[in-house]
Image: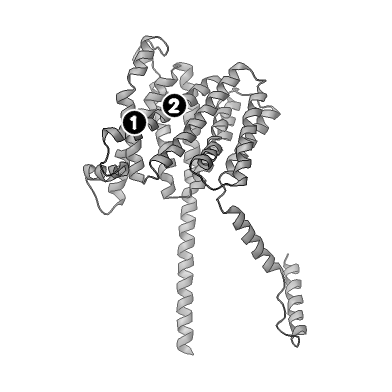
C-alpha cells in the first residue's frame, strides 16, 4: 500500500509539472501574441498614415510602390541572420539558398519557373500595393483600411470556389456583411465620383490580395519560413530589375515628376518601406511564436487607430452610416477568424455545461434518501456561494 501511494504521488507530481509547463508555454505565447498584435497594428496603420503624408509632398503612388517592394530583397538576409542565431546546424548562405530553392521543384529556380510561378505573383503584389496607395489619394485612411479587411472574405469565397474548401455558413454571412459594408461606405459619401473611385480601387486591391493568396496555395502550396523569405526576396529583386523603367518613364512624362532628388521626402518614403517590410515579416513569420488569429486581429485593430488619427487631423467626418459600415466590415472580418470546427466546439461546451448542471442519478433505491440529501446540500452550498 505504501509503495502504491508513492507511485500515485509521483505520478501526480509529474502531471502537475506537465500542466505547469503547458500553462507557462501558453502564457508565454499569449504575451508574445499581445506584443505581435501591437506591432502588426502599428506597422500597418503607420505605413498607411505615412503613405498619406508622403502624397502631400510627392504624389507618386507607383514610384512609392516600386520603392517599397524593392525592400523585399532584405527578407532572405534577415531570415538567414535569424537562422544563424537559432538553428543548431549553421549552413552557409549558398547551402541555405539551395535548400530553400527546392520549394520551386526538383530543378530549383529555373527561368521557366521564374516566369510561370514567380513573375505572376510579383505582378499581383505590385498591383495590390499600387491600388491600395491609389485609393489613399482618393479617400481617407479609415475607409481604406476598413475596406481592405474585406480581402479575408474574398479569400474565403475564392478558396471555396477554386480550392474546394469546406463550406461554412458563418463565413458566407461574413462575406455578405463585408459586401454590405462596402455599399454603406459608398452611400456614406453620397455616391460622389471621387469616393466611388477610391472605394473601387481599394476593393480591387483587396481582390488582388485575395487572388494572390489563393493562387499561391493552388500553384505553390504552403511554404516554410525560409522558402517564403526566399520567394519574397526574389519578388523584390525582380521588381528592381524589371520594373525600374516604369518610374523613369513616369518621371520623363511628368506623371510622377520631381525637381531634384534632394526634394524627395526620403524620410517618409523610407518609413513607409520599412513599416511595410516589418508588417510583412510579422505576418509571415509571426505564427512561429504566437497564434495566427492574434496576427489577424492586429490588422483589424488598425482601423480604429487610423480613425483616431484621421479624426485628429480632420480628414474624416464620422456620420452614422460610416460608423455602422466600418463596424459591419470589422465584424465580418472577426467572424472569418472563427475556426472551422467552431460549431462543434460550441456544442461540446454546451454539453459539458449541461452535464455539470444536471444532478447525478441515484445508483439504487435504498440509498436514494442519502443521495438526495447530498444533492440538496451541494445545491444550497452553490447557491450560497453565488
Look at 40% across and 9% down and name the residue there.
254
Residue 233's place in the image compared with 90, above or below, is above
Residue 116's place in the image compared with 198, above or below, is below
Secondary structure found at label 1: helix
Is residue 159 left or right of 347 when viewed as pictured? Answer: left
Q: What is the distance, in whole Å, between disc 2 and disc 1 at their CAs? A: 14 Å
Look at 26% across and 46% down and name the residue there.
99
Residue corresponding to mark 1:
236
> Is 385 in front, or is 140?
140
Is residue 307 left or right of 89 when viewed as pictured? Answer: right
Q: Earlier in the sequence, mark 2 or mark 1?
A: 2
Mark 2 crowd level (few <14, some 14–19, many ≥20, 10 Å Cα):
some
Secondary structure found at label 2: helix
Find residue 82 and report its image quarter. Answer: top left
Look at 45% across and 87% down and name the residue there.
3
Residue corresponding to mark 2:
127
> Is 374 in front, or is 118?
118
> Is 198 in front, or is 265?
198
In the rendering, at what x and y percent does residue 208 appear?
48, 31
Amino acid at each position: 500500500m505504501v509503495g502504491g501511494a508513492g507511485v500515485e504521488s509521483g505520478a501526480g507530481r509529474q502531471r502537475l509539472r506537465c500542466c505547469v509547463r503547458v500553462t507557462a508555454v501558453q502564457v508565454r505565447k499569449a504575451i508574445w501574441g499581445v506584443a505581435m498584435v501591437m506591432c502588426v497594428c502599428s506597422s500597418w496603420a503607420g505605413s498607411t498614415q505615412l503613405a498619406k503624408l508622403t502624397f502631400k509632398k510627392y504624389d507618386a503612388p507607383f514610384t512609392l510602390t516600386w520603392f517599397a517592394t524593392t525592400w523585399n530583397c532584405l527578407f532572405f538576409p534577415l531570415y538567414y541572420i535569424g537562422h544563424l542565431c537559432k538553428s543548431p546546424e549553421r549552413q552557409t548562405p549558398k547551402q541555405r539558398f539551395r535548400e530553400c530553392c527546392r520549394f520551386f521543384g526538383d530543378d530549383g529556380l529555373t527561368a521557366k519557373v521564374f516566369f510561370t510561378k514567380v513573375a505572376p505573383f510579383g505582378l499581383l503584389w505590385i498591383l495590390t500595393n499600387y491600388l491600395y496607395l491609389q485609393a489613399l489619394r482618393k479617400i481617407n485612411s479609415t475607409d481604406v483600411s476598413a475596406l481592405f479587411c474585406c480581402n479575408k472574405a474574398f479569400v474565403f469565397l475564392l478558396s471555396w470556389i477554386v480550392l474546394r474548401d469546406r463550406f461554412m455558413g458563418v463565413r458566407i454571412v461574413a462575406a455578405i456583411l463585408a459586401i454590405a459594408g462596402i455599399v454603406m461606405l459608398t452611400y456614406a459619401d453620397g455616391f460622389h465620383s471621387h469616393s466611388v473611385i477610391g472605394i473601387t480601387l481599394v476593393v480591387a486591391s483587396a481582390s488582388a490580395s485575395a487572388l494572390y493568396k489563393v493562387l499561391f496555395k493552388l500553384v505553390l502550396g504552403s511554404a516554410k519560413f525560409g522558402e517564403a523569405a526566399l520567394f519574397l526576396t526574389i519578388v523584390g529583386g525582380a521588381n528592381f530589375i524589371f520594373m525600374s523603367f516604369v518610374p523613369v518613364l513616369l518621371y520623363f512624362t511628368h506623371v510622377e515628376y520631381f525637381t531634384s532628388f534632394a526634394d524627395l521626402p526620403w524620410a517618409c518614403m523610407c518609413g513607409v518601406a520599412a513599416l511595410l517590410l516589418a508588417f510583412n515579416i510579422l505576418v509571415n513569420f509571426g505564427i512561429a511564436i504566437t497564434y495566427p488569429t492574434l496576427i489577424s486581429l492586429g490588422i483589424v485593430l488598425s482601423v480604429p487607430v487610423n480613425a483616431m488619427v484621421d479624426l485628429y487631423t480632420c480628414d474624416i467626418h464620422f456620420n452614422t452610416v460610416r460608423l455602422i459600415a466600418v463596424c459591419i466590415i470589422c465584424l465580418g472580418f472577426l467572424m472569418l477568424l472563427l475556426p472551422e470546427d467552431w460549431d462543434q466546439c460550441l456544442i461540446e461546451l454546451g454539453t459539458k455545461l449541461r452535464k455539470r448542471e444536471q444532478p447525478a442519478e441515484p445508483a439504487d433505491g435504498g440509498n436514494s434518501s442519502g443521495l438526495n440529501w447530498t444533492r440538496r446540500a451541494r445545491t444550497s452550498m452553490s447557491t450560497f456561494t453565488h
